[in-house]
Image: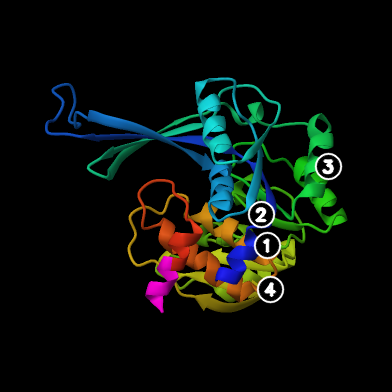
């Protein structure tokens, strides 16, 4: 683990995707509103964090790597706040052209329990970009990095044209390519080094319907995804059931989850793809990379809210498992 973390500290990763600001309203309640049968929230504090693709970049930086994030940052208070959070962590930002407001997800929490979530975002087409507008910037940065992560949250920034162009540049310069997909967008990608869908997303990528109370059809899912996308590595996150590893369309080993307690799974997928990409880019084998990512996710789900993990936390966590 220490050796792998040392190699990771020398890496630089570019993340391209849908960035957002996570806003948390922390409060308490002791009464029901006379206007409607809902609790009255007495707000105690507000906190903010980077969400979506920006959280992938935060996880990369937290694990010791250098990160650059490309996404749409609106010219509003939320955009300034999000840029500030990333800059404070040493993450370089590339603001893509577009109109509209920064995506904000507000979660209201009462006594550490989520009451509701409020989303603010512009129409999907406002975030789409023409590759010729930013091609010089991407060509320069792809040369400098060790890996590229496409983080799709189905908000519209990633397009077939953009994915194809950046993938071509990454292959030309022999950079690792990782994709965290949202299958309902049906983006066209082919032969990435890594795909990291969750259970539901894997079924969608495979074109299968989830059967209630039936075991996950691992063999069929892996075969179908490989037939269509031909990833070098496929890692399907199965929540409490761990991670399913697949190579060349064959379902392989399931790495059991390392989570000891689960407070909040939001952002766990961001941690997983960040850790997997870093480990693979550092030269680790798939199983070793999955063990590393599994441990990182185990730390993160034990925290409340969108979170990251540091090398010290990871080393301490793993040492208690031995």
| Residue 139: numbered disc | 3
Foreground label between 3 and 1: 3
The Cα atoms of the two marked residues, 1 and 4, are separated by 13 Å
**Label 3 or label 4, whichever comes before in sequence order:** 3
The relative height of residue 37 versus residue 165 in the rendered view (above or below) is above
| Residue 179: numbered disc | 2
**Residue 14 in view here:** yes
Q: Classify the position of the C terminus by image quarter.
A: bottom left
Residue 219 lies left or right of residue 40; in this view the side is right
The magenta segment: 316-322
The Cα atoms of the two marked residues, 2 and 3, are separated by 19 Å
Tag 3 and tag 1, C-beta contact below 8 Å? no
The secondary structure type at the circle numbered 1 is strand
The relative height of residue 85 versus residue 285 in the rendered view (above or below) is above
| Residue 194: numbered disc | 1
Tag 2 and tag 1, C-beta contact below 8 Å? yes
């Amino acid at each position: 683990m220490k050796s792998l973390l040392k190699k990771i500290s020398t890496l630089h990763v570019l993340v391209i995707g849908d960035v957002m600001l996570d806003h948390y309203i922390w409060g308490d309640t002791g009464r029901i509103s006379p206007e409607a049968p809902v609790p009255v929230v007495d707000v105690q504090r507000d906190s903010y964090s980077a969400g979506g693709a920006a959280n992938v970049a935060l996880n990369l930086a937290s694990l010791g790597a250098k990160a650059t994030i490309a996404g749409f940052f609106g010219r509003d208070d939320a955009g300034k706040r999000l840029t500030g959070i990333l800059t404070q962590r040493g993450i370089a930002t590339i603001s893509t052209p577009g109109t509209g407001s920064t995506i904000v997800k507000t979660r209201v929490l009462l006594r550490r329990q989520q009451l509701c979530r409020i989303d603010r975002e512009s129409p999907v087409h406002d975030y789409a970009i023409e590759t010729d507008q930013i091609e010089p910037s991407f060509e320069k940065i792809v040369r400098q990095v060790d890996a590229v992560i496409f983080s799709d949250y189905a908000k519209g920034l990633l397009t077939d044209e953009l994915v194809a162009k950046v993938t071509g540049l990454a292959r030309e310069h022999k950079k690792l390519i990782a994709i965290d997909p949202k299958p309902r967008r049906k983006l066209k990608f082919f032969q990435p080094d890594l795909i990291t869908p969750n259970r539901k997303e894997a079924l969608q990528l495979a074109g299968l319907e989830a059967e209630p109370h039936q075991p996950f059809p691992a063999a069929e899912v892996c075969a179908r995804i490989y037939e269509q996308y031909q990833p070098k590595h496929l890692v399907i996150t199965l929540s409490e059931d761990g991670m399913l590893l697949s190579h060349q369309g064959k379902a392989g080993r399931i790495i059991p989850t390392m989570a000891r307690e689960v407070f909040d799974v939001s952002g766990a997928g961001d941690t997983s793809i960040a850790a997997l990409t870093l480990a693979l880019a550092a030269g680790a084998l798939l199983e070793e990379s999955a063990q590393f990512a599994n441990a990182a996710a185990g730390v993160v789900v034990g925290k409340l809210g969108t979170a990251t993990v540091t090398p010290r936390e990871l080393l301490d966590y793993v040492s208690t498992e031995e």
